[in-house]
Image (cartoon, rainbow, N blue to C red):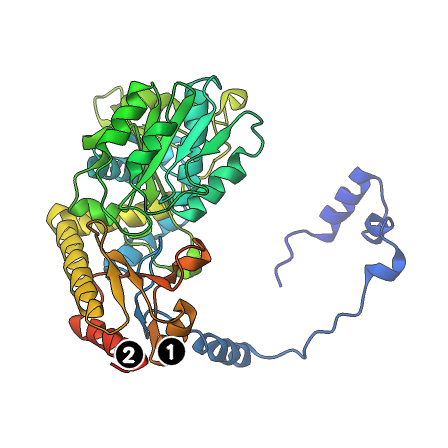
């Protein structure tokens, strides 16, 4: 056992606080509670404990052994081995927030490269590093918009097709604002045209938030919604799937002021739900309102290239009373993982991944449509996720799929009660044609087709 203090050091500390012994420190705790009998198992060796933990972990299914058709915001993509190898290097793995640029050039450059990649991918002017996940980014977009208008605009318009977790997090973040009202996402048909949001936008609106592709996987053109937001002086925020931008036009092309999203598809494993990466990019006009870290490229007195934290006057550690957010971590390691992933793939590699996702998802939809009782809801183009109306409950189907080593789709009824027996199926590049065919065969088995 490592004991950092000597007896003389402990005696010195006790004298400083005015007590004679360590026991005196705990006199405020009733004596009967000081040393309770703990019902702990008998001690075992490291070898025995390792064997037991291995047995426990073997009881968990994972996407390494199972086919995964579950998405709904977190996706099973292939991650090149170089990603983990690079982020595990000591200089990255142990690095902390780079307040001292003279000794943090490597970390600062890594963050700068991440910001540059995300800005290029989204078509925006600036990107931060970063938020905890996509839901946090969505909530921070609301905080930014409220601060941008100095609290004079208090209406937030959310698409009902925005991820339900994002909408919940926004409400959690804003519950302390007595004047903020959130409209558009409750009591509405989740599949209705986004143009219905336009009637809710007025001069009281701070921000309108939509998702692209939306939570149901649909590809929607939000040009009219963005135009309506800007005509009323409001900001327009778009939540993205970064993989989809390998094929689709960036949100900047239909007027986005803020781009947010979940960065997990960019080389980050599912990991039981985290840690993930919240993407957040904006137009230049909003750069002083962004929370999180901003790294800039500059030159030193000798003209050599260098990197620094920039616009730090608006950060929490200098002018806390003017901060627009309490987010402080820069999520540097996870941002680095996405940078390595994007760098390895390159522009053409990301496009290839997106095309594989798209083509395989459409093959799966076509095959599922041929199974008796199952029908794909085709009310809009989709990327790599689509809705399936089922003849049984989704829970029944997923239980049967699990028996065949398959993780089925998301049960939409759990979040949208009107969508009974509707499954959200996700297909990524890691699934083969044979995997999809097996999935369809199990559905046929259930329908006696």
Q: Which residue is mark 2?
A: 442
Could you tell me residue 90's position as x and y percent?
37, 51
Mark 2–mark 1 CB contact (< 8 Å): yes
Could you tell me residue 335's position as x and y percent?
33, 44
Q: Residue at x 28, y 48 (%)?
A: 338
- Looking at the image, residue 150 lies above or below residue 9: above
Viewer-closest of 446 and 357: 446
Res. 280 visible in picture: no
Measure how far apart labels 2 and 1 are at the Cα level: 8 Å
Could you tell me residue 289's position as x and y percent?
40, 24
Could you tell me residue 29's position as x and y percent?
85, 52
Query: Which labelled disc corresponds to residue 230?
Result: none
Q: Residues within 10 Å of mark 1 (few under 14, many from 20)?
A: some
Res. 221 visible in picture: yes
Marks 2 and 1, the one that precedes in the sequence: 1
Q: Is residue 19 left or right of residue 135?
A: right
Tell me the quarter of the image containing the N terminus. Answer: bottom right
Count the marks: 2
- Looking at the image, residue 223 lies above or below residue 3: above
Q: Residues within 10 Å of mark 2 (few under 14, many from 20)?
A: some
- Looking at the image, residue 276 lies above or below residue 269: above
Query: On the image, which quarter does residue 280 sit in?
Result: top left
Query: Which labelled disc corresponds to residue 400?
Result: 1
**SS state under label 2:** helix
Tell me the quarter of the image containing the C terminus. Answer: bottom left
**SS state under label 1:** helix
Q: Residue at x 58, y 31 (%)?
A: 176
């Amino acid at each position: 056992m490592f004991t950092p203090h000597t007896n003389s050091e402990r005696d010195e500390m006790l004298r400083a606080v005015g007590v004679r012994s360590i026991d005196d420190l705990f006199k405020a705790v009733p004596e009967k509670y000081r040393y309770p009998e703990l019902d702990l198992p008998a001690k075992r060796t490291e070898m025995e404990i390792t064997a037991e933990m291995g047995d426990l972990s073997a009881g968990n299914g994972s996407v390494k052994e199972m086919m995964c058709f579950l998405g709904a915001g977190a996706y099973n993509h292939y991650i090149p081995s170089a990603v983990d190898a690079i982020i595990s290097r000591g200089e990255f793995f142990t690095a902390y927030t780079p307040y001292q640029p003279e000794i943090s050039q490597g970390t600062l450059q890594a963050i700068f490269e991440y910001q540059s990649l995300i800005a290029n991918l989204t078509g925006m002017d600036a990107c931060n590093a970063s938020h905890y996940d996509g839901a946090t980014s969505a909530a921070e977009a609301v905080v930014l918009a409220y601060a941008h208008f100095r609290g004079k605009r208090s209406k937030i318009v959310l698409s009902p097709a925005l991820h339900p977790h994002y909408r919940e997090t926004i409400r959690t973040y804003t519950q302390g604002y007595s004047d903020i009202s959130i409209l558009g996402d409750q009591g509405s048909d989740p599949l209705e045209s986004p143009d219905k949001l336009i009637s809710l936008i007025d001069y009281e609106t701070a921000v309108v938030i939509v998702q692209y592709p939306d939570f149901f996987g649909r590809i929607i053109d939000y040009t009219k919604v963005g135009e309506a937001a800007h005509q009323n002086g409001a900001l327009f925020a778009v939540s993205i799937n970064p993989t989809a931008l390998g094929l689709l036009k960036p949100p900047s092309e239909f007027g986005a002021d803020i781009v947010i999203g979940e960065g997990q598809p960019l080389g980050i494993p599912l990991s039981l739900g985290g840690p993930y990466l919240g993407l957040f990019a904006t137009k230049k006009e909003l750069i002083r309102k962004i929370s999180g870290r901003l790294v800039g490229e500059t030159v030193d007195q000798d003209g050599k290239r260098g990197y620094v934290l920039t616009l730090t006057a608006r950060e929490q550690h200098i002018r806390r009373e003017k901060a627009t957010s309490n987010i402080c971590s820069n999520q540097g390691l996870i941002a680095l993982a996405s940078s390595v992933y994007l760098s390895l793939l390159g522009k053409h590699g990301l496009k290839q991944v997106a095309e594989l996702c798209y083509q395989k998802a459409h093959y799966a939809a076509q095959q599922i449509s041929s199974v008796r009782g199952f029908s794909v809801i085709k009310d809009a183009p989709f990327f790599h996720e689509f809705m399936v109306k089922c003849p049984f409950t989704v829970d029944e189907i997923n239980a049967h799929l699990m028996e065949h080593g398959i993780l089925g789709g998301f049960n939409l009824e759990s979040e949208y009660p009107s969508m009974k027996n509707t499954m959200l199926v996700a297909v990524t590049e890691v699934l083969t044609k044979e995997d999809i065919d097996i999935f369809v065969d199990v559905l046929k088995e259930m329908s006696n087709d």
